[in-house]
Image: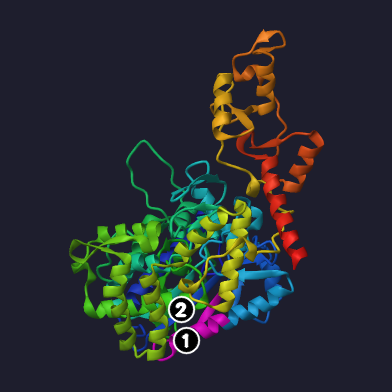
Amino acid sequence: MGEQRVSLVQDEVSMQQFVKKLLRDVQALEYMLDNDWFEKDIVRIGAEQEMCLVHRKTYKPATIAMEALDHMKDYDWVETELAKFNLETNLDPREFTGHCLSELEKENAGKLDKISDRLKDMKARLILTGILPTLRKYDLEMHNLTPKKRYYALMEAINSQLQGSAYELRLSGIDELLLRHNSPLLEACNTSFQVHLQVSPNNFAPLYNISQVLAAPVIAVAANSPIVFGKRLWHESRIALFQQALDVRTTNEHMRQRSPRVSFGTNWLNESIMEIYKEDIARFRVLLSADVEEDSIKLLSEGKVPKLRALQVHNSTVYRWNRPCYGVSPNGQPHLRIENRVIPAGPTVVDEVANAAFWLGAMVGMHTAYPDIRAKIGWEDAQDNFIKSAKFGIDTKFTWFGDQKVTATDLLQQELIPLAREGLKQRNVDSGDIDRYMGIIEERAKMHMSGSRWQLRAYTKLSKEVTRDEALCGLTASIIKNQKANKPVHTWDLPNAEDMPDYKPARLMVDEFMETDLFTVQKDDLIELVAELMDWRKIRYMPVEDSKGKLVGLITSRLLLRYYTHQSRLNGKTATCVKDIMIKSPITVGPNETIVQAMRTMRDKKIGCLPVVQNDELIGIITEMDFLRITGRLMERLEAEFED
């Protein structure tokens, strides 16, 4: 969130006081820009590393962040994130020259190793991935919000702006996700590797515009977030998920346009950073306040540099994918940065630094080659490229300079990688660093392989061999194994089901296990139709629901056999419709029960299936065949252990 000491706006007076401070910060920033207060003789880079915590054996989210931090009190560079299964580290700013990239990799890897060592005692691991494959919807309930004042305030503030009844996710890729959720904690699905580039005020506008153009090709080559709740969606699903998780808008009959707080932007920057800050204040109401004691205007009159805390608080609640940042350097001078937020966490530390090197080098190289990028490409094309790259990743076809249509791999190899190499040379970055990191980007482009494409191939392969949950756990285990070796993702082998011998499904929840691609009928349907459907689909159980999706009954193959055996008569009456023979009050199970509980219910009640119901709505089904698949896999593993 950036600024830590924040709170919910409690009343009109506190709101007005904070807004006054915010406006004075804007005036102070404008004054410092006009009077050349900013640091310009040095260029620094920096980064923030977000990560997920998982249980060592189950690979499911481990909600232990607060306990983990108690074990790391001597590490002042690690801190909380929004959810209890996330942590974040801050990497040291360093001058953009020499061995800065390899030093960044070494520092990041070293800090992650230290965290991993402390997590061993807690039977947990860390993983770098844009979206954790094993995340479940109920992991994003409010009880997993990190218990800190600023997070509660942010959630409450966003909820207060919600126009509809719930937050909605709508994403389509190979699969489709249509989902309602009751809180903006869905944002916690996303983890990233946020890279900062310090820029001079005079160059901020042209460089910011370049960062907007580069966002799409960076996403294409760095994408690492294709799987959400077991669904194969966009190559970089973080882009849509983050916006929709915080989107308080709803549909209306009118055409009024409202901007989401998470956005790519609305147009090019023309003059300075002030255009962004002023637009964000104009478009978005203040969500959070802070007890700001400093008077930024008074400090300026004393020749002192203000921290602009009110402006930083507001900036932390508007989520541009390229975010403007203000800071004060150790020498006391103010500086400006562009924060790149499109790069996902992972697949490995070396991959992340390669992504950073590509963006940083391309920023410098493109600025030299194209001082005003607006003359080469239209805003609409830059924005369209951004969305397309999030959807299709390295498979994207861009609209580039001169209305040229070019594939991501061709654009990378023929233009952007050479530009990035040249930009790094201009910054006098070590030639060994340039070859190491740009070589990784080159190989990804040549092999047409990104983290997302690898995950999609791996998960699809595993899903054909084992259950959905075991496939997700196997995928996660394979990612962790490769991360530990710090192997670039284009060199990874696809995992096999046998690579996860310690998979234990006993604590699996019904929600992770149930079948959700359902075939159902309604109570007025003909019995003959039901018989044909069950024969065509080779299923033994057919839920009966009403037009609203509420479960009202169940048809079994045994009931159909009895129906036909008794020549279409039941209790002395002619049976023609589903309602005449269905079980009217079938035994059901909730999504948050364990499969052991479900298995016990089926055994005790001597039934072969359990419809899964939430708030009377049918959401899935589990049958004895589902349990047979799990027990079969367990027996195969036991047999393999016996043979060993």
Mark 1 is on which residue type?
A: Ser
Q: Quadrant of residue 382?
A: bottom left
Q: CA distance from mark 2 to mark 1?
A: 8 Å
- The residue positioned 25% from the left and 68% from the top of the image is 270
Indicate left or right for 487 with 67 as reference.
left
In the image, farthest residue toward the right? 604
Residue 257 lies in the magenta-colored region: no
Q: Determine whether the residue tagged by mark 2 lies in a helix, strand or loop.
A: helix
Give the crowd class for mark 2: few <14, some 14-19, many >=20 residues within 10 Å. many
Mark 2–mark 1 CB contact (< 8 Å): yes
Q: Position of residue 171 (x, y in %)?
A: 45, 49
Query: What segment carries the magenta color?
Result: 89-109
Q: Position of residue 579 (x, y in %)?
A: 63, 19
Q: How many marks?
A: 2
The reply to whether residue 586 is in sight is yes
Q: Which mark is residue 623?
A: none
Nearer to us in this view, 166 or 149:
166
The reply to whether residue 303 is in sight is no
Q: Determine whether the residue tagged by mark 1 lies in a helix, strand or loop.
A: helix
Q: Which residue is mark 1?
A: 102
Q: Which residue is mark 2?
A: 353
Please state, as top left, top right, bottom left or bottom right, where the C terminus lies in the image: bottom right
Mark 2 is on which residue type?
A: Val
Residue 107 lies in the magenta-colored region: yes
Give the crowd class for mark 1: few <14, some 14-19, many >=20 residues within 10 Å. some
Tell me which colouring the rendered structure shows: rainbow
The answer to whether residue 462 is above or below residue 307 is above
Q: Position of residue 636 (x, y in %)?
A: 71, 57
- The residue positioned 33% from the left and 43% from the top of the image is 256
Q: Quadrant of residue 545?
A: top right
